[in-house]
Amino acid sequence: MTYLNKPLQIGNLTLFNRLIMPPMATSKGQEDGKISKAVLEYYNEKSKGGDISLIIIEHSFINQQGKASNQQLSVAEDSVVEGLSELADIVHNNGSKVVMQINHAGSAAKNEVTGLEVVGPSAIFNPRLGSVPIELNDVGIKHIIKSFKDAAVRVKAAGFDGVEIHSAHGYLLNQFFSPLTNKRQDQYGGDVHNRIRIHLEIIKEVREAVGEDFLILLRLGASDYMEGGTTIEDSKIAVKEFEKAGVAILDISGGFNGFTVPGFVGKAYFESLTEAIKEVVSIPVILTGGITEVQVAEELLMEGKADLIGVGRSIYNDSTWAKKAIESFR
């Protein structure tokens, strides 16, 4: 058996291979964020054939203030559950497990999209997405924690296998994690443990609300690749705390550098990050970014760089990529 075709047991969930489809924004939702026919057709096409063990649905906003863009999917109110349930059923019927990524854009939000004030951990310019927010107070932070919890409850009610908390790519939780944008002087700022306090409070609230049998994933921008930003050493501290708090899978990506690493030469953009993180945790780690060839995916697994491989753009561009990749190893 090849590494790519090897099953993986995570709690009560079995993934039949190591190939996942990572979250990629489609802007196919309805204006209010509800599931559209176009969304259902897109994920039906991507999951058809059942060659991808896990599909992580694109980031969805937990409340109106956290909405990142027009036609982004919503998990912000109970009325979206019916459409989300249709989506979960389609992916399940095609043979894959499915998780929903939930997010708050923070200073990456825009007033013209949300109609509301832009907020963040500190009144600091967002180096990736270009906005200076109003600093959140304790009431605002508690409201966001509750919004994450409520969103996770809706995702579970819709029949998904889990939820992924988004803390990468310059969005709100990444803004708390990064010293570039977190200059707070209270319990949510300072050292790494304080900068991930909001993450741990969200994980705790979500876990208590959804129970033990519902997977919690966390996507972490494990390095900003910028002077004064987060480093892999910060992330090694953080992921150990996330594992203790109940995160079942870590999905590793970039921070304020986004999806790629400038000047990178190698197999996969973030392989050095996942390799380092695997040394300090026992839960599965997803590696995504720049992986376009099945042989490279197999080598990364064989070398112990990750437990699961996310292939984004190749699957986005060719819905038969996974089928051809898996068949090449049978």
Image (cartoon, rainbow, N blue to C red):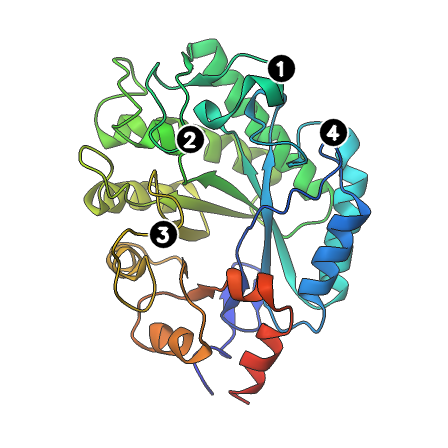
Q: Residues within 10 Å of mark 3 (few under 14, many from 20)?
A: some
Q: Is residue 298 above or below residue 126?
A: below
Q: Who comes first in sequence, dot 4 or dot 1?
A: 4
Find the distance from the CA under tag 2 to the CA under tag 4: 23 Å
Label 4: which secondary element: loop
For label 1, the residue is 115
Is the Cβ of the residue at disc 2 closer than 8 Å to that at disc 4? Answer: no
Residue 323 is drawn in which quadrant?
bottom right
Residue at figure coordinates x 30%, y 28% from the top left? 195
Is the Cβ of the residue at disc 2 closer than 8 Å to that at disc 1? Answer: no
Label 2: which secondary element: loop
Q: Who comes first in sequence, dot 4 or dot 3?
A: 4
Q: Is residue 15 left or right of residue 200?
A: right
Residue at figure coordinates x 53%, y 73% from the top left? 17
Find the distance from the CA under tag 3 to the CA under tag 1: 31 Å
Find the distance from the CA under tag 3 to the CA under tag 2: 15 Å
For label 2, the residue is 129
For label 3, the residue is 260
Q: Residues within 10 Å of mark 4 (few under 14, many from 20)?
A: some
Q: Who comes first in sequence, dot 2 or dot 1?
A: 1
Q: Who comes first in sequence, dot 3 or dot 1?
A: 1
For label 4, the residue is 32
Q: Who comes first in sequence, dot 2 or dot 4?
A: 4
Q: Which mark is residue 3?
A: none
Image coords of residue 113 (percent x, y):
61, 23
- Nearer to the camera, 144 or 125: 125
Label 3: which secondary element: loop
